Image: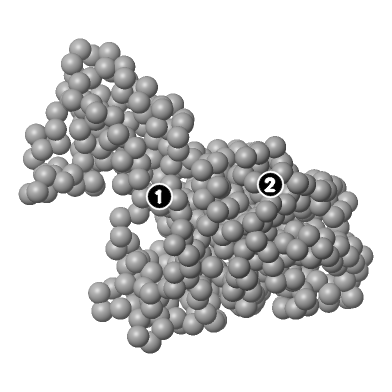
């Protein structure tokens, strides 16, 4: 046992044992004294089962949080397995991290993954499934497999000290109080909710409300019901929550100009946030503040906060963060950082500068007031407004697998869903069927929602390809984006568009 989280649970049980610490599906929730007992029971169960690396594959709720905390205070590495991962991505994470036990509320979905023996989770409704792997002693506390710019994402290794340092910085920067109520609106398997939501709240002694994702309006990586989310915020009497930009957009649209909540801090991250959206949020009493972070730095490195915020900026660096801009305009971060990547080849150490800074791949600047502004990315990665990272080459390669698809460009940066532009060798019904088939193989955050098609090569139009014939993504997408949906029945059309099945 040990660490700041362990101490916070003990102190909470001692100082206010009758106060509610966690609320899930049970209306009464778990009091601080019972949280200490339940975490200890779960920790003993993990120790008795000789768990080496624990995967967590549950919907949001008390079981997710308790099993994570039990592993955290025991020093047992955890690997969140998001429900939005495909079976292939989950198996990749299980194999790469050598997971030998999984807490799951859908034990049947683990068939064939080597976890055939299961027992009820101590004090919970989920089950602890055991496998036969025996991992080497790892040097990390948590491995987060991001949504993945490709089909086989790398795992980011984080230590307990790093996770707790970030959570403590967040509690300090946001002025978290023991009277606060945090509503988990994002999947707990996402590091941002796990650290900036749960760990931050625990360190400040607040209450955490973690209903199922459906109860807060989140049905998938691209499915959001703002009316449910607004109702959940009101019912929980929440003072804080974390959203991605697309969710904030929905709340603003459905709030009727007055959100009528007790929120005092609404963090927004995972993707760029338009200043106009933040202004609109504040106009309807949604105190939304943009931040900036990476999984490699336990989710947050800079943050706007009440009384110290600036539109168009990602905020000031957290107290423990050392942030600078390189000569080529790239954001570099020093101080506490991750311990490397887990890949099929083993653990790969991070590539640092000679003085210990990590290059983020993001362009940025620090203004005269010390606020960080993120101006773009040096590498070609799309980030949807739901905060999912997607490499366009990954999806393009799937689309190009059909022999009649000559060229493909995928776009949708900063938007809720992806679009594709295809140059085909022959028009026909096969195109929609092919896109639908590709979508079925992809996780929902990486599926194509709209598709524009031309039967002419991109090079037939001026300015759409390089001198070497490679498509210029922005120019291709801009050229075809204005096409009206429908029209696929036109005989041998030059171009048309359709909404694809997802």
Q: Which of marks 1 and 2 is in front?
A: 2
Vertical relation: 497 (above or below) 353? above
How many discs appear? 2
Tell me which label, 1 or 2, sits earlier in the chain: 2
Residue at 23%, 46% (x, y): give it: 473
Density class for disc 1 (Cα within 10 Å; few <14, some 14-19, many ≥20) is: some
Indicate the quadrant where residue 77 lies: bottom right
Q: Is residue 155 visible?
A: yes
Q: For the N terminus, give its image quadrant.
A: bottom right
Vertical relation: 54 (above or below) 423? below
Q: Is mark 2 on a helix, strand or loop?
A: loop
Q: Is mark 1 on a helix, strand or loop?
A: loop
Judging by the rendered image, the residue that carries numbered circle 1 is: 150
Q: Is residue 265 visible?
A: no
What numbered label is drawn on residue 183?
A: none
| Left or right side of 408 for 433 | right
Find residue 260 and report its horizontal and vertical position in percent: 68, 49
Find residue 115 and report its horizontal and vertical position in percent: 68, 47
Indicate the quadrant where residue 462 lies: top left
Find residue 73 and report its horizontal and vertical position in percent: 74, 71
Judging by the rendered image, the residue that carries numbered circle 2 is: 115
**Front position in the image: 224 or 35:** 35
Residue at 42%, 67% (x, y): give it: 313
| Left or right side of 475 for 410 | right
């Amino acid at each position: 046992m040990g660490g700041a989280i362990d101490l916070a649970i003990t102190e909470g049980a001692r100082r206010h044992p009758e106060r509610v610490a966690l609320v899930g599906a049970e209306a009464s929730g778990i009091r601080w004294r019972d949280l200490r007992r339940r975490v200890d029971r779960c920790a003993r169960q993990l120790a008795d089962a000789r768990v080496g690396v624990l995967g967590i594959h549950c919907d949001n709720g008390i079981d997710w949080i308790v099993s994570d905390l039990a592993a955290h205070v025991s020093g047992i590495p955890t690997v969140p397995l998001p429900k939005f991962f495909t079976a292939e991505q989950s198996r990749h994470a299980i194999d790469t991290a050598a997971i030998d036990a999984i807490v799951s509320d859908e034990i049947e979905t683990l068939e064939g993954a080597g976890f055939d023996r299961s027992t009820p989770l101590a004090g919970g409704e989920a089950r602890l499934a055991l496998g036969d792997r025996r991992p080497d002693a790892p040097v990390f506390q948590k491995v987060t497999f991001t949504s993945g710019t490709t089909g086989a994402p790398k795992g980011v290794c984080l230590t307990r000290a790093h996770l707790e340092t970030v959570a403590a910085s967040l509690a300090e920067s946001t002025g978290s109080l023991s009277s606060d109520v945090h509503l988990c609106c994002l999947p707990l398997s996402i590091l941002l909710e796990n650290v900036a939501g749960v760990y931050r709240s625990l360190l400040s002694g607040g209450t955490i409300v973690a209903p199922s994702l459906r109860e807060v309006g989140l049905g998938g990586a691209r499915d959001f019901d703002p009316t449910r989310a607004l109702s959940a915020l009101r019912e929980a009497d929440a003072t804080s929550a974390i959203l991605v930009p697309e969710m904030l957009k929905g709340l603003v649209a459905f709030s009727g100009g007055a959100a009528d909540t007790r929120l005092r801090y609404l963090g927004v991250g995972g993707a760029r946030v338009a200043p106009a959206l933040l202004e609109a949020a504040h106009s309807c009493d949604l105190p939304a503040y943009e931040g900036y972070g990476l999984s490699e730095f336990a989710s947050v490195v800079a943050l706007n906060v009440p009384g110290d915020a600036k539109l168009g900026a990602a905020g000031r660096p957290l107290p423990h963060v050392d942030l600078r801009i390189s000569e080529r305009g790239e954001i570099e971060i020093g101080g506490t950082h991750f311990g490397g990547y887990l890949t099929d080849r083993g653990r790969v150490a991070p590539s640092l500068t000679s003085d210990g800074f990590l290059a983020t791949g993001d362009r940025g600047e620090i203004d005269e007031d010390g606020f960080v502004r993120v101006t773009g990315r040096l590498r070609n990665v799309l980030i949807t407004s739901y905060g999912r990272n997607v490499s366009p080459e990954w999806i393009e390669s799937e689309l190009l697998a059909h022999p009649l698809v000559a060229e493909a460009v995928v776009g949708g940066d900063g938007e809720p869903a992806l679009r594709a532009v295809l140059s085909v060798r022959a028009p026909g019904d096969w195109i929609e069927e092919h896109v639908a088939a590709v979508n079925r193989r992809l996780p929902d955050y990486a599926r194509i929602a709209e598709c524009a098609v031309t039967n002419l090569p991109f090079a037939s139009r001026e300015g759409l390809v390089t001198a070497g014939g490679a498509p210029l993504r922005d120019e291709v997408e801009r050229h075809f984006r204005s096409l009206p949906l429908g029209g696929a029945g036109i005989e041998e059309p030059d171009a048309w568009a359709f909404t694809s099945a997802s």
